[in-house]
């Protein structure tokens, strides 16, 4: 199926992206920065799952950021939407097939570490998979990657150092931390947040980890960036709602766009 998706995409554009970018909930503004762009709705790509989550545009945008060819997934599929592991990672497989050798994953996340604040950016240094499954379960395609891929540096140290340098140059505060992936769609309970903090998580969300595993399996370099769109349950005396996630995404939009515009050309595959 990825071969058919590859033919469809390459039949719509001559741009051959070297890097892929996934934009999380409320973080889709960056796609407007691309020139010579081609927008392809996910519904037009064979096998590509539709994005049903609010705040996800549901289209693949391929274009140029200066001289850099980029593929942007404006929205992603989630396990909580009823999709399986192969479906939520399908986009990463397809982007690899059309030439992308690096992936940057962004997401909206809840802040667990008490040092974090709403609207802050966090570079993912590692993750904890609590989604109850792994996208590599089943027969392995040796042409894509090894049966037992190493995950000791799932998020490129070199990319993180570059990202920290760019953030410093732009005077953008940025933290670094561990991302815990939960199944969702219900937000975590205060007890679950205390548990996550105890096992070393700094932020929590419902995406990214399956995609990062698949990207590592194929030998792609990975950078993960979480936007702390809300403080997790039990930290502040109020309930959590998705509107707050979208509001914060809008609040940090310009900062994230400025950061990504400066960062992507500095990432070498």
Image (cartoon, grey):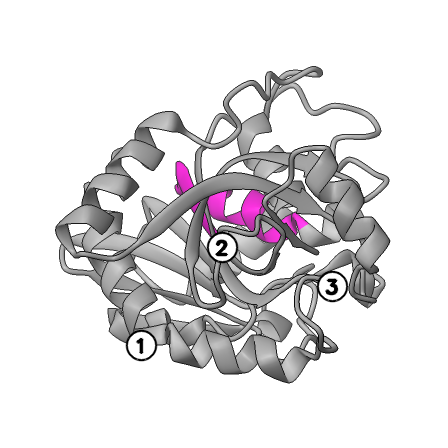
**Looking at the image, can residue 55 be seen?**
no
In the image, the segment drawn in magenta is: 89-105
Q: If you read the primary sequence from the N terminus, does the residue marked by circle 2 or circle 3 appear first?
A: 2
Q: Residue at x 62, y 84 (%)?
A: 243
Q: Taking 71 as reference, is 235 left or right?
A: right
| Helix, strand or loop under label 1 | helix
Residue that lies at the very extreme toward the front in this rendered image? 237
Residue 39 higher or lower than 155, as above or below? below
**Between marks 1 and 3, how big is the CA–CA gap?**
33 Å
Above or below for 164 versus 38: above
Q: Quadrant of the C terminus?
A: top left
- 165 or 72: nearer the viewer: 165
Which badge, 1 or 2, is on the more N-terminal residue? Answer: 1
Residue 104 as seen in the image, left or right of residue 235 = left
Q: CA distance from mark 1 to mark 2?
A: 29 Å
- For image coordinates 46% across by 71% down, the residue present is 27
Residue 252 in the image, given as x and y percentages of width and height: 38, 72
Q: Is residue 260 left or right of residue 12?
A: left
Q: Which type of secondary structure does the marked residue at label 3 adopt?
A: loop
In the picture of the structure, the residue carrying the numbered disc 1 is 32
Give the total of numbered labels. 3
Image x and y of residue 92, in percent? 55, 47
Marks 1/3 in contact by CB < 8 Å: the verdict is: no
Q: Assign a secondary structure to mark 2.
A: loop
Q: Nearer the viewer, residue 38 or 24?
A: 24
Which residue is found at the position 59% from the left and 70% from the top?
Answer: 42
How far apart, in angstroms, are the residues tagged by discs 2 and 3? Answer: 14 Å
Quick one: label 2, few (<14), some, or many (20+) residues within 10 Å?
Answer: some
Mark 1 or mark 3: name the one nearer the start of the chain.
1
Q: Which residue is mark 2?
A: 116
């Amino acid at each position: 199926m990825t071969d058919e998706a590859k033919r469809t995409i390459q039949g719509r554009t001559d741009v051959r992206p070297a890097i892929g970018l996934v934009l999380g909930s409320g973080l889709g503004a960056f796609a407007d920065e691309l020139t010579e762009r081609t927008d392809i709705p996910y519904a037009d790509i064979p096998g590509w799952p539709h994005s049903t989550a609010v705040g996800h545009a549901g289209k693949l945008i391929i274009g140029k950021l200066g001289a850099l060819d980029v593929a942007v997934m404006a929205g992603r599929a989630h396990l909580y939407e009823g999709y399986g592991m192969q479906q939520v990672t399908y986009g990463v497989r397809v982007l690899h097939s059309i030439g992308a050798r690096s992936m940057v994953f962004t997401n909206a996340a809840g802040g667990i570490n008490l040092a974090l604040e709403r609207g802050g950016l966090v570079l993912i240094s590692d993750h904890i998979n609590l989604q109850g499954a792994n996208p590599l379960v089943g027969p392995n395609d040796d042409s894509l990657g090894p049966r037992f891929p190493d995950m000791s540096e799932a998020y490129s140290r070199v990319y993180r150092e570059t990202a920290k340098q760019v953030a410093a140059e732009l005077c953008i505060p940025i933290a670094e931390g561990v991302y815990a992936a939960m199944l969702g769609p219900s937000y975590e309970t205060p007890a679950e947040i205390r548990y996550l903090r105890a096992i070393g998580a700094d932020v929590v969300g419902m995406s990214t980890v399956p995609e990062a595993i698949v990207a590592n399996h194929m030998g792609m370099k990975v950078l993960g960036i979480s936007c702390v769109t809300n403080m997790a349950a039990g930290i502040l005396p109020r309930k959590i709602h998705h509107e707050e996630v979208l509001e914060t995404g809008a609040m940090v939009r310009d900062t994230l766009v400025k950061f990504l515009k400066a960062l992507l050309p500095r990432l070498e595959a």
